[in-house]
Image (cartoon, grey):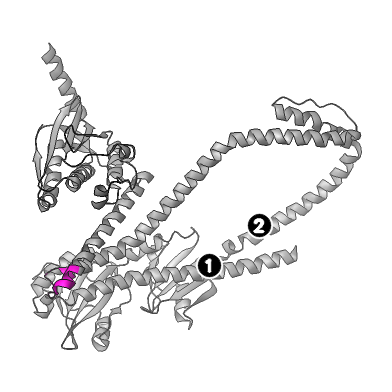
Amino acid sequence: MAIAGFYIYQNERDHITKSTIATSRALMSALDRELASATLAAQVFASSPFIAADDFAAFHREATKIAPMLQASALVLADATGQQLADSFLPYGEVLPLRGSLENLRKVFETGQPSVSDVFIGSISKRASIVIEVPVLRDGHVKYTIAVGIFTDRLDDLLRRQKLPPDWVSTIADTSGTVVARSSSPELVGTQALPVRLSATTSLRSGILETVRRDGTPIFLGFSRSDISNWTVAIGVPVSTAFHDLNLFLSIGLIGVIGVLIAGFGLAYYQSTQIARAVQSLIPQALALGHGEVPPIPRLSVREVDDVAHALNRADQLVKKRTAERDSAKTKEEEANILTGVMTEFVNNVSHELRTPLTSIAASLSLLSSDSLHPLRPPVARLVSLAHSNAQRLVRLVNDILDIARLESGKVLFHYTSIELLISVEQAIEDNCASAQAKGLSIRLDERSPGCIVRADADRLVQVLTNLLSNAIKFSPQGGEIVVSVEDANGMGRVSVRDHGSGIPDEFRSRIFGKFAQAETGDARQKGGSGLGLNIAQQIVTRLAGTLTFENAPDNGAIFCLEIPLSDKQASEMVMRAYHSAA
């Protein structure tokens, strides 16, 4: 038992060493990707012609638009003295102060390379922040710097997405050992945490230490340091957690030894007096067990042991057969549910990890394809435009997948208010008018029922209507017309959207609201799309207590019909009007 305990101790120590180091390296890679993404976008923006022309007002306008795309608190342009020339956090024209800390700025002017600052408290925002600073070159020399301000809350989100065990604590520290982000005890941000200071001062790039937290808890501390920013990521694991299996093994082993001793003495005494009756009593018990009856317990001798073996074999066959029949369907269902849950969690995690880099790529490509940068040659412009279109399509696909995951998990909050249905329809038509015109289509609002009040979430309702109009635009022929109508229908607000396309194939009707569902016809495949829009729309309509149906039009095309219950007050008024009309 001592040898087994020592083996478990060594095995657990090796496992926790590899696990914490691997986890800290993975987390550091995620951090490097986050910083590199913002650095790349800032470098693209540094080539803006507005900066080359010293047009700071135009730079401020562009920076105000781009900062939200980069999830940045501000974009700041400064000269070598630290004087701010434009700050997207403040309105243009206000008197701007000198930069609070010039160390990072001077480093960029000296090296001509991007630099990441240590954590500090912003003089204007009063929040913990970091700055990614990139040079603006002119004639081969650094003329200005662009600083991308990032609140450390963004790095807190990065730590939370790792889904570490509850008692594991992850920490990000800057080059001075100051805490930038922490998965627990956020009040320590900006302080010198002892375990992080130890990992920051060692000469190793990664490794594991044994130390204690501020509350005195002994921990294993796995750490990894970035080759890019020289920041440190540390994962603290309580020693008690690491040796949980060893303690459990020793406890169970001690209880087992005591139990075996007691059972041995008791069994020796019991076998000397009861073995014949105990063995023989198994025969009727086994047979009764197979037939589902209450077994009798007769007194028989030991010579019946052979009969006991045969009886138990027959009973075992009967029990296995009935158990297999009963559990077969349940097992298949559980396996299907487990597989579905694993796939959903996998897609959700991948989508979260993809969204940030895709957003940065789309923003960078948008800058390259806009007039804000130097004009591109036609072949290059076409490639950039194609890449930008594909990046936007991937962002929409990721957002659709995340919408489905949130809807199925019940994490989407609906804000119900009284809404005039016609206003929501007109807003959706206006939002999709440009897409229709680009294809030579027209959208006509045929029947209007003003005053049709429904109780719904305004944004989600417009999302459903936009999806129906987008589908109609996609499958309508060039120069066609899309007809929309709004009407009251027996206490329901009804919206119909009709296109003049090829209609819905019969073999596709049963799958039209499924995930990634697309018709197999060549024409439908050429239209593109993820096949998620109608599934999302149906889930939203279900949450709004409504229905979403479809049918093929008599001549050609398809008609989608959305019905949502009217508000209680308006439904009562319609009943009273119907009663008076009948009287």
Q: Are marks 2 and 1 in contact (CB under 8 Å)?
A: no
What residue did someone put label 1 on? 19
Residue at 46% across, 80% down = 205
- Residue 551, horizontal then vertical, whole percent: 23, 34
| Front-most of residues 167 and 52 | 52
- Residue 82, horizontal then vertical, whole percent: 19, 82
Please tell me whether residue 360 is drawn above or below residue 520 in the rendered image: below
Q: Residue furthest top?
A: 583
Identity, as a three-letter code, of the amino acid under mark 2:
Leu
- Mark identifier at residue 248: 2
Residue at 38% across, 45% down = 409
Quadrant location, the C terminus: top left
Cα distance in 3D space between marks 2 and 1:
20 Å
Residue at 24% across, 52% down = 526
Identity, as a three-letter code, of the amino acid under mark 1:
Ser
Residue at 70% across, 54% down = 252
| Front-most of residues 290 and 420 | 290
Q: Which residues are magenta?
A: 368-382
Quadrant location, the N terminus: bottom right
Please tell me whether residue 421 is drawn above or below residue 349 in the rendered image: above
> Toward which corner of the image does residue 130 lie, by quadrant?
bottom left
